Amino acid sequence: MKNLTMNRRTFLKVTTVAGSGLLVGCTFSSPQLLSTPKASEEELGLWVRISTDDKITLILPASEMGQQSHTGQAMILAEELEADWNSIQVVTAPVHSEFTNSQADPRGIQVTGGSASISFFWDKLRQVGAGTREMLTEAAAQKWGVPVTECQADNGRIRHSVSGRSLSYGQLVSAAARLSPPSSPTLKTPDQFRLIGKSIPKLHTPAKVNGSAGYGIDVRRPGMLFAAVSQSPVFGGQLKSFQEAAAKAVRGVEAVVPIPNGVAVVADSTWHAKQGLEALTPQFEGGESAGLDSAKVTTRLRTALDEMGKAVISSAKVLDVEYEMPYLHHATMEPMNCTAHVTTDSCDVWAPTQGQEYSMKAAMEVTGLSEEQIRIHTTLLGGGFGRRSEWDFVTQAVTVSKALQKPVQVIWSREEDTQHGFYRPTSMSRFQVGLGKDGLPVQWESQIAQPNLAARFMPPLGWFDFDPMAVAASVHDYGLFPDHFYKVEGVETAHSPVDLGVPIGPWRAPPNSLNVFYTESVMDELAHLAEIDPLEYRLKFLGESPRHKATLERVAKQAGWGSPLPEGHGRGIAIHDWFPLDEAKTVVTQVAEVSVTKRGKLKVHRVDCVIDCGLVVNPDSVKAQMEGGIIMGMSAALFEQITLEDGRVTQSNFDDYRIARMRDTPEIHVSIVESDAAPTGVGEPGTSPIVPAITNAIFAVTGTRLRRLPIGRQKLI
């Protein structure tokens, strides 16, 4: 594990103005930021605040959206701090350069995503905790007049091993604040961990159970108003007309405010705002997706493939297939919402956001205020999956509040949420693979046509003629990106971007949720063509990837691969690694057992999963992430799709955008590979391999190969 150096320019501590506690600020990337006496008290408490009553507040960089990053990050910091776990409370960090995450986003912005909350902050949080612990230990040693080597931190107290005396952290904070910070704090070794590696109960569970947990939708401010919105059903359309007088005649309605792409009705309650919106009857015109339907989408994608042209394969055995995947909605349980209070010289935003920096920039753009005049308060998120890294809902709330100079909460209806997302791109891919006499590929041609997802996040690069996110997790020939774990000869890869006018964005594990389905399905098809067992076939390509090989063999053994199954049952296998642009990858393997009745009814009975994610901070969190990811991926495979008609999303709610229900959920068995390597991410990688594992299992039992998703009502026998 790498070790970061902390010195007097990169570790700063002060007492509060009232002298009531210790504030710890730590900066690694910009030493000068906090090494000035003009640094604010809020900045100086960037990571840890310890009060004289022994309460410890940890300021954590990640948004909490059910992935339990707050619990994991708190465990890392508290481990090195030797804190009393029961004394800890956590808050989400404000906007600050020290909380940027270049692993989640190469540009280095403050965002939660990419399974990077634990892996990226692993070193930083340990350094902060260890440095704070050593300051408290030295303060106690000086107070007692004893060697610091005789003092040990233990569960929120410093104890003197010789005399048995002890002092709580709260009793030491004032003295500790007067000390020079450690130049290079000593980190624990894994055998000294008392929290890390344990399934510690999640910090937010009690509040979620008793209803006190604060999500964005729960925010209440004095004098707050509520807004309902209507946006153009055709993407990019403009507001044409509305009946303002009719809306204002509705009880409780106070204002009608135009917003980007639509209009908001503001009232004294959400219900009155909704009634006012119905009376408003807004009309829209134009739009980039006007006239587009799902059939035209498929035609455009296939045309793009055809324009790339098919290759000539001279092998005796050739696989020539096309796969297609639909747009997907994030379907978060909490619809998009945001609360803002704009005055002439300030702006407060309360948002369930994954992207604090994006939210800050949106508020600055609308208000014209400086970053110092704006505060972003991050609430708990009722689901994210990439959708809440967007900022459209923040822009709306700030726009409405600015117009009224009052606190306003914007809440989208489920219909607005479903029909105005940033969807996972639709995609079509063609594979032409020629096999040698040994059944292994000698020529691998793959082409993919889909909207350019990377274009939303990085400037155009003249030497890129493709979307780099289109090749991640695929067997490709682009030397700019890490090689795939499958070592394949004769690979040629091409991508054609297709602009369809439909908003797209990250959907849990972008773009792996597309390419893992393609790659693992094709590997299964090649195994069948070569007349080799799908497990044995995959192992032939993993000679240079021992972690992948071991994880694949372990899941096969766990699932009983090759053992007899009841009639009508079959197994499918798949493997995936994450993160695509990082050397430290998480490896996930899965086996799905399904049954198909003689009438073609499908049921997923069991899923076995093995994950190798380096050192595990909280095993229960890892298992929960795998279970949740498996169910989400299974839901996408079985049911989910966004379709278009006349440029509009057809689906509107959970009655026609079906997601997996409890009755659909299989038995899930998750095993974790023990490792002492640095932690890697777990939020994304469990979602992708379950999709091909299910379709491969369907082929195993029926002989029917599914190359288009969702499975839905496709004929299986």
Image (cartoon, grey):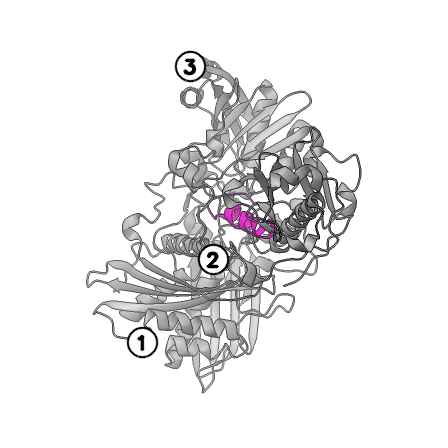
Label 1 secondary element:
loop
Residue, disc 3:
250
Q: Nearer the viewer, residue 78 or 326?
A: 78
- Residues at badges 1 and 3 in contact (C-beta under 8 Å)? no
Q: Is residue 461 left or right of residue 523?
A: right
Q: Residue at x 34, y 42 (%)?
A: 656
**Residue 346 in view in this figure:** yes
* Residue type, mark 3 in image: Val
For marks 2 and 1 on the same chain, the one whose residue lies earlier in the sequence: 2
Residue, disc 1:
562
Residue 282 in percent (x, y) is at: 47, 25
For marks 1 and 3 on the same chain, the one whose residue lies earlier in the sequence: 3
Q: Is residue 398 left or right of residue 204?
A: right
Residue, disc 2:
513
Q: Nearer the viewer, residue 236 or 340?
A: 340
Magenta highlight range: 60-81
Label 1, label 3: how far apart the Cα atoms are: 67 Å
Q: How many C-alpha atoms fall within 10 Å of the one at disc 1: few (<14), some, or many (≥20)?
A: few
Determine if the magenta segment contains residue 62.
Answer: yes
Q: Quadrant of the C terminus?
A: bottom left
Determine if the magenta segment contains residue 70.
Answer: yes
Residue 596 in percent (x, y) is at: 24, 63
Q: How many C-alpha atoms fall within 10 Å of the one at disc 3: few (<14), some, or many (≥20)?
A: some
Q: Quadrant of the N terminus?
A: bottom right
**Residue 95 in view in this figure:** no
* Residue type, mark 1 in image: Gly
